[in-house]
Image: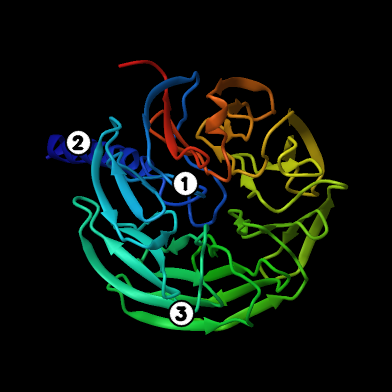
Amino acid sequence: MAKTILVYVICGIFYQILSLNVAMAFWPSFHANYQRNGQTEEKGPLEPVLKWQFEGLGDYASAVVGKDGTVYAAGKDTLYAIQPTGKEKWRYHHPDSHFSPPSLGPDGTVYITTVTKDSKTHIVSLDPDKGKKKWQSIASQGFTAEYWVSHIAVSSDGMIYVAAADNLSAFAASGIKKWTFQFPANFGTVAPSLSPDEKTIYVYRRNRDGLYAFNIDGTLKWHDKSPYYSDFSSPTVASDGTIYLLDAAEQNLHAINPDGKKKWTTHFSNKHVGTSNVAIGKDGTLYMDIANSGSSNGGMIYGINQKDGGVKWKFEIKDGYIGTAIAVDGRGNLYYAAGDATIYCLKPDGALQWKYSVAKEHRFFYSSPAISNEMLYAISERSGVLFAIGLSKD
């Protein structure tokens, strides 16, 4: 009897370890997760070796990674599923439309939004194995997108939240629309973020309509009407529920309590703020990239104290576009793809671990690097090339 119990205990421990490892091989969304904090338990490469490249991707593209290691990334009107070896697995094409970057549900389902020539925004659900369409629903009408379409957020119970045009909509995993909230017109909307308990949805209205917090039934929880402005930044949510928001209008970083009240504000004089996203380290340190007077003139990566907004350290990038997203791996290392055509890996204290340069035509712009299984994936929107960086050649 004792031996039988011991076998069950050992098997249970093994199963838990195996489950944890499978769950860790998962980068489901832009900026790692639906709190948009750039943090993962996955470990990135400690030295850079180019394993493979994949061409044909589009503007404002970011990769996501499924639990089986499949990499998903979009071109203008085509979504690609890429095997861990760099070979194409499948593609989904919808002509004459613009795609959002993909997002993954808890069961691996792939979601994208498409904006068609008739100004309709559709949410599309795809089977991850073969790329077959499971369902499609209209999220909004009257939205035109020449380049950028906002990311989707998916909760652990499969609810899907789409911000497009002037509304926020919630869909069940079956494709049935549950509710829609209509915003005031003409303020623009960026990707929704979820609170750690997934009971609150945060939406940043990019053109001075403030920050909204919603309950999961679509009712408004609160509205911070401060005239914030952002190019692309989504709210970043910490494990304690604090929301971090970049404001390009006043060059500020705001820390906001879950009830909508300001915690602290840090000002960056004569800097360009608002094209990046805040990342959070394992010790709570905030990481962000701040451009010089113009977003194409270089800038700094900052380490910020989460308690008071004080600057802990700075790392200079002398040239190129500053405004992509920082990824933080399980060791606490930072990964950043910059507009000087260089990928940087920094230690948690801001010291350089390594850097890897590509040809100048592959400058990085707005891409969120993805980390999975000792690999780093970064897309150059300028050339449409996905770079897979690992430890050593096969």
Q: Quick check: 70 above or below 335?
A: below
Tag 1 residue: 62
Residue at 46% x, 79% y: name it: 141
The residue that label 3 is drawn on is 141
Which numbered disc, 3 or 1, marks the residue that appears first in the sequence? Answer: 1
Question: Looking at the picture, does residue 152 appear above or below residue 260?
Answer: above
Residue 247, percent across and down? 75, 58
Residue depicted at 38% across the width and 61% down the height: 112
Q: Which quadrant of the figure has residue 192?
A: bottom right
Q: Is 136 situated left or right of 213 in this image?
A: left
Q: Could you tell me which secondary element the residue under label 3 belongs to?
A: strand
Residue at the right extreme, as displayed: 269
Foreground tag (1 vs 2): 1
Residue located beneath label 2 in the image:
6
Q: Amino acid at mark 2?
A: Leu
Q: Quadrant of residue 371?
A: top left
Residue type pointed to by label 1? Ser
Give the foreground label among 3 and 1: 3
